[in-house]
Image (cartoon, rainbow, N blue to C red):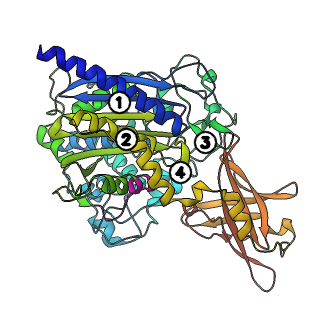
Amino acid sequence: MAATVAVADDQQSFAALDRYIEQARQDWQIPGAAIGVIRNGEVIYVKGFGEREAGKAARVDEHSLFQIGSLTKAFTAAAVGLLVDEGKLAWDDPVVKHLPTFMVADPWLTRNITVRDLIAHRTGLEGGTHVMKPGDPARRMKEVSTMTSNIPFRSSVLYSNSMYDVAGQVIAAVSGMSWDDFIAQRLLAPLQLRESSPDVVAARIWDSKYLAPSMYGQAPAIRASIDNAPQANVTMPHWLTKDGNKPLPWQILLPGGGGASGSMVSNLHDLLTWTRFNMGDGRTANGTPLLREQTLRELHTAQIFVDRPSSASSEITWRTVRQAVPGNDAVSYRPAYALGWFVNTYRGYRYINHGGALLGAMSTIAFLPERQLAVVVLTNSYGTGGRGLFNPAVTLRVVDEFLGVEPRNWSADLRRTFDAYDPMAKQDRERQLQSARPKKQPPSLPLASYGGEYESEAFGKVEVVRSGDRLALRLPGVFEWPLEHWHRDTFRMHVTSGGVELMDFLATFQVDPLGRITSFDPGWVLFGGAMKPVKKN
């Protein structure tokens, strides 16, 4: 009788979840999503919602593939854990012990950064130019060598994809195989994650002409569609425009087996298996030991506190939780980063989670170990507002449902917080931008005079070229973005991918009294600041 009642209760909960998720999907304008729930070691809910590509008939299901971005970090941390268990390295070994080529700008930091520091985001070093341009592990290491501290060493979390890619090179140096081969052979194979791949190239889904060479790069074919991968159950990433969601190409993060920060491809089916493993004792589904239980617990143990949110999405989410659940922070689990996972508190329980984002795709895993409850959410658009808030709207509702508390409309709560957090999103940004524009004055130089190569130590070289009656910023083989004249020596840079405009920035040339250009600042932090003209021989 008790079992029958429990099943009936579950079915009622599932039906309520179906309705809530579908309404939230429409409200946040998400083309497609896949959601799964684990309770007491069993997968109890698996469902796809919506379309793999906006406007196409193909539906999302548990086998639909997504690029999962920074969910990759937990795999990288677990890979280090395997090597720790084998005695081949220790968490607190200096990186240079295993990777003698490792170097940052400060020699003291070079000597003292440990493997634990890399994967706990506590080096105080950030980086970020890799999302703009193609690279490989060797080039990444060269870029890292110029990095300087943003915050003091081990003072707080400073999220760094670059340091995770260094961790991938440590794995390669210690194991004798590339990071992607290690992930495939030592984690994906024993866990039977047969539909997952270390990166988009290894997945062998796409002809290269349909792949963007970097996160903000341009695919050679410009546009891509599920029709270009007819043999694969893939979802397209999307960018929400005023005309609806537009598909974007999949992106290569770091070729050559080095995308340890965020290059993996997976689906709901495999990520539920991966999450169950993380909630277990270090054994695979068939009982074979993979990680020592102590090592697995270390991956989920706070290493350094979070003093500021790692993203706007995180800030909005936890601000909303504080408003809706009074006293949520009055417990022992202060926001922190573990090893490949964030640690926080939700309704008095330890809340272990991580998100992932590549351009136009969002992913989330969250679990409460003490309640043996977990949620996986995958989507193929950031949705309304561009912050990926559909994911926490679903995650928090699912957790409430199975904690037995009164479920909230987290979707509405998050939207209210977002509207207050980013009032520009509620208004016509273009109108505001135009109203703040100074009275237009012509460029101080002929357009051709702005052309040429510019470079910085942080980014390398880019080229400004004349394109009709406009300028354009070009990185050959990666992108060419229009520079629309705005005011005197300031130009509006339009960032595009797949024929879709993603965002824009005001780029500025500095011109000295003699009419010589002294610097060019693209206006986007990912370029690393102002660039100097390359002197011609």
Name the front one of labels 4 and 2: 2
Task: Name the N-terminal-most of marks 1 and 2.
Answer: 2
Q: Secondary structure at mark 4?
A: helix
Task: Name the N-terminal-most of marks 4 and 2.
Answer: 2
Task: Name the N-terminal-most of marks 1 and 4.
Answer: 4
Image quadrant occupied by the N terminus: top left
Q: Quadrant of residue 431?
A: bottom right
Vertical relation: 104 (above or below) 412: below
Specify whether residue 373 is in view: yes
Judge by depth and name the residue closer to the eye, 39 or 259.
39
Residue 303 located left or right of residue 241:
left
Residue 462 located left or right of residue 452:
left
Q: Secondary structure at mark 1?
A: helix
Q: Which mark is residue 201?
A: none
Q: Which mark is residue 240?
A: 3
Q: Residues within 10 Å of mark 4 (few under 14, many from 20)?
A: many
Marks 1/4 in contact by CB < 8 Å: the verdict is no
Q: CA distance from mark 1 to mark 2?
A: 15 Å
Q: Secondary structure at mark 3?
A: strand
Task: Name the N-terminal-most of marks 3 and 1.
Answer: 1
